[in-house]
Each structure stands twice: as C-alpha cells, then as structure tokens.
Amino acid sequence: MVKKIDHVGIAVKSLQDALAVFSDALGMKVTSTEVVEGQKVKVAFLPAGEATIELLEPTDPTSNIATFIESRGEGIHHIAVEVDDIVSSLGRLKEKGVKVIHSEPVPGAHGTRIAFIHPKAVHGVLMELVEKTGKGH
C-alpha cells in the first residue's frame, strides 16, 4: 500500500518568511510553488533527499491551514505517503475501520490525487495519501 514518504507538510503564516530560513539560510532549493484552490493554500516544494518539504501558507482565513495555525501555531501539519492506487488504499482503510477525512480522493498539488487519514486513527498524526497521476511529475 505505502511506497515511501512523499513529503512533510509544514504550516506557515508566510511563505516569504519561511523561505528566508528554508531556502536562504538552509540552502534548500525551491522547485515549485503553486496555489491549490481546493485546499485554500499556496505551497512551495523543497526537495530533501527522496522526500520533499511542503510549506503551506493559507490563502483564506477559513482554510484548514489557517485554522491549524490559529489553534496550534506554525509547524508540522502532516506527513504524506505515496500510494500506487489511492482508491484501493482508501477502501482497505475503510475495511479495517480506520477513520478517514476524505472518503474519496480530492485534487492535490502537481495534479496528484490525495486523501487524509484522521489523526485520531494514526496516533495523533495527520497522514496524507498521495497518488501521483503523471501530470506534473
């Protein structure tokens, strides 16, 4: 089911401020930025070995990222794992009684299909399933 860790999502108030540290000070290269309208975020991707750091800035005060920052502050928001078939992965989770946030895949950055597993089901960690569809990869 899980192939590898795809990325770690970090909620930030400002991509510009975050990139001053991640890119300028740490020397990480930004490979792309994108607005994901459905998630109400602007994201920047910085490769770190085989995985990526995804910085997420809310574009709307009602977004999940804005709510997260308001209640918990900036920091690690989720861990994403790559799967070959997100529909069958979600089906398996449902069969096992694992609580999911998305029962069907939704559009993610770079043309991916994503779905989140509820943190209560994964020992307090918000987990994202990512299926790379070939668009943007």
Image (cartoon, rainbow, N blue to C red):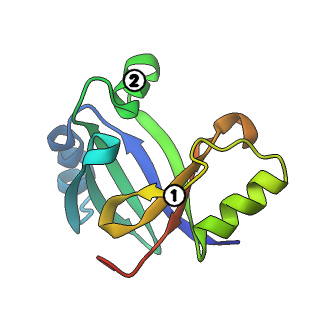
Question: Which residue is at a point 51% across and 64% down the rendered structure image?
Answer: 130
- Calculate the distance from the C-alpha at mark 2 to the C-alpha at mark 1: 22 Å
Is residue 122 shown left or right of residue 72? right
Q: Horizontal and vertical percent for residue 11?
A: 37, 38
* Furthest-front residue in this view: 104
**SS at mark 1 in the image:** loop
Q: Identify the residue under disc 2.
A: 67
Res 84 visible: yes
Q: Quadrant of residue 49?
A: bottom left
Hey, which quadrant is residue 87 in on the image? Answer: bottom right
The quadrant holding residue 1 is bottom right
Question: Which residue type carries mark 2?
Answer: Thr
Q: Position of residue 112 (x, y in %)?
A: 40, 67
Mark toward the viewer: 2 or 1: 1
Residue pictured at 29% horizontal, 76% vertical? 136
Q: Residue at x 34, y 31 (%)?
A: 63
Residue 54: assigned label: none
> Front-most of 42 and 27?
42
- Residue 30 visible, this angle: no
- Label 1 sits on residue: 105
Badge 1: residue crowd in 10 Å (few <14, some 14–19, many ≥20): some
- Work out whether residue 99 or residue 65 is closer to the camera in this orientation and state it: 99
Q: Is residue 48 above or below residue 62?
A: below
Give x and y (percent) for residue 84.
59, 77
> Which residue is nearer to you in this view: 125 or 95?
95
> What amino acid does circle 1 point to?
Pro
Task: From this view, report whether residue 80 is shown above or below residue 62.
Answer: below
Number of on-image labels: 2
Which quarter of the rendered picture does the C terminus lie within? Answer: bottom left
- Observer-nearest residue: 79 or 117? 117
Q: Residue at x 51, y 57 (%)?
A: 105
